[in-house]
Amino acid sequence: MTSEVFTQTITVPKSAIDARGHVNNLTYLEWCLNAAEAHWIRNTSEEQRKSYVWFVLRHEIDYKTAAFEGETVEVSTWVTSAEGVKSERHYRITRPADNKTLVEAKTIWCLLDGKTLRPAKITEEIRNLF
């Protein structure tokens, strides 16, 4: 599956810094989830967002190097597969100043019917949005 890459730029806030002086590991995951949601919102209609919701089944995340307060990072995400009721979305968080990869991650998502919250087959229409 060929997929568009969606990217958000973030300036690391003080609130993201942990006791060791760098971005907290959970913050990276939060940034990934926020990028996925923003990508979904950007590419879908209000009607589609009412009809379907995504539920996380699994996260995998590899931490490569740290980021620090005030640095600019880019969170990129793209969908690599969407079959049946499951979709695999990848993420890469980089620091443009030195082109370092900070995090690589992926999430397995399950598409749910917005009313029943039961798994829903990913339609061609949804697949083509990404």
Image (cartoon, helix red, strand yellow):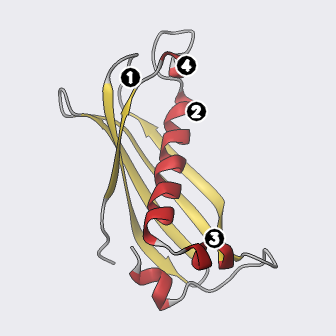
Q: In the rendered structure, which amino acid carries the disc numbered 1?
A: Ala
Q: In the rendered structure, which amino acid carries the disc numbered 2?
A: Leu
- Where residue 104 appears, as percent x and y from the top left, is 39, 44
- Where residue 75 appears, as percent x and y from the top left, is 37, 44
Which residue in the structure is indicated by mark 1?
A: 66
Where on the picture, by quarter, is residue 108?
A: bottom right
Looking at the rendered structure, the number of numbered marks drawn on it comes to: 4
Mark positioned earlier in the residue sequence (2 or 1): 2
Residue at the image point whose x is 47% and y is 88% from the top: 125
Q: How far apart are marks 1 and 3 (CA)?
A: 30 Å
Callouts 2 and 4 close, C-beta under 8 Å: no
Looking at the picture, does residue 19 appear above or below residue 56? above
Mark positioned earlier in the residue sequence (2 or 4): 4
- In the rendered view of the protein, which quadrant contains the N terminus? bottom left
Tell whether 90 sits left or right of 3: right
* SS class, disc 2: helix
Q: How crowded is mark 3: few (under 14 residues within 10 Å), some or many (20 or more)?
A: many
Which label number is shown at residue 26?
Answer: 2
Q: Residues within 10 Å of mark 2 (few under 14, many from 20)?
A: few
Q: In the rendered structure, which amino acid carries the disc numbered 3?
A: Cys
Q: In the rendered structure, which amino acid carries the disc numbered 4?
A: Ser
Mark positioned earlier in the residue sequence (4 or 1): 4
- Where residue 35 appears, as percent x and y from the top left, is 46, 50
Which residue in the structure is indicated by mark 4?
A: 15
Residue at the image point whose x is 48% and y is 77% from the top: 82
